[in-house]
Image: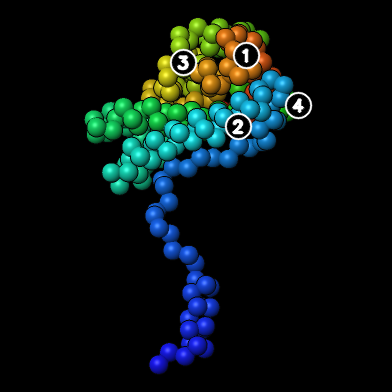
Amino acid sequence: MITRRTLFELATLAAALPAASNAADPPFTLPKLPYAYDALEPYIDSQTMQIHHDKHHQAYVDNLNQAVASDPALAKLTVEELLSRLDTLPATVRTAVRNQAGGHANHTLFWQTLCPAARSGRPGGKLASAIAQSFGSQEKFEEQLRAAAAGVFGSGWAWLSLDAGGKLILDTAPNQDGPLLAKRHPLLGIDVWEHAYYLKYQNRRADYLAAILHVIHWDFVTQRYAELSR
């Protein structure tokens, strides 16, 4: 016969054990912003940052987890591996992975390449020299970056990336495509989907592009270049 004392001891033991998870953790999760929603004010507004991160990026993560749910092998790959091996993936998930993994990878880097204006600074080290060699000067690079981003038809990105030969490449890509699909290393991406700027700038994409240059985290981009160009 089980006494009240035994029942109490069993309940106490059960409470001390870790709670069992009803489901395995998803392979991909939304990264936290490295700053507050309002940290990029007045250039990027708080409401845009919250919706962009919490809603749009979360949707890419959720949809990517759904796309790989039926294939344990795919769920074990990193988002970078999924995109770099896109042509080898099953045709049934290829488009979903391209769009959703692309959105997840692009935004994960995007948040890291932004920072409060007081910390933005300028490129340093080898990156500063590479920009000067490739584009003439930092000012000319920014002009070309803004022009490229402004010229994206519809939704997409403007990218600064590093190719296999160590050369800086400035180009654009539609939708959530990016340098990873071309076997290049992304350094800096400018999001020109309307959800990135429409609440504050409406149809004035040029104003948004001028503003976002004030909050580029050049220390991060400089360090990333140094690591990838070794």
Disc 2 crowd rating (10 Å Cα; few below 14, some 14-19, many 20+) is some
Give the amino acid at mark 2: Gln
Work out how far the residue at label 1 is from the one at label 3, CA to CA, in angstroms. 15 Å
Work out how far the residue at label 4 is from the one at label 1, CA to CA, in angstroms. 22 Å
Q: Position of residue 1 (x, y in %)?
A: 40, 93
Q: Is residue 2 above or below residue 158?
A: below
Chain-order first, disc 1 or disc 2 = 2
Chain-order first, disc 1 or disc 3 = 3
What's the residue at 48%, 10% (across, down)?
152
What's the residue at 29%, 30% (across, down)?
94
- Farthest-out residue, left: 91
Marks 1 and 3: CB-CB under 8 Å?
A: no
Work out how far the residue at label 2 is from the one at label 4, CA to CA, in angstroms. 21 Å
Identify the residue position indicated by label 4 in the image: 118
Q: Which mark is residue 155?
A: 3
- Farthest-out residue, right: 118
Nearer to us of marks 3 and 2 is: 2
Chain-order first, disc 3 or disc 2 = 2
> Left of 87 or right of it: where is 206?
right
Q: Secondary structure at mark 3?
A: loop
Nearer to us of marks 3 and 4 is: 3
Identify the residue position indicated by label 2 in the image: 50
Q: Secondary structure at mark 1?
A: helix
Nearer to us of marks 2 and 4 is: 2
Identify the residue position indicated by label 1 in the image: 201
> Left of 171 or right of it: where is 44?
right
Work out how far the residue at label 3 is from the one at label 4, CA to CA, in angstroms. 29 Å
Nearer to us of marks 1 and 3 is: 1
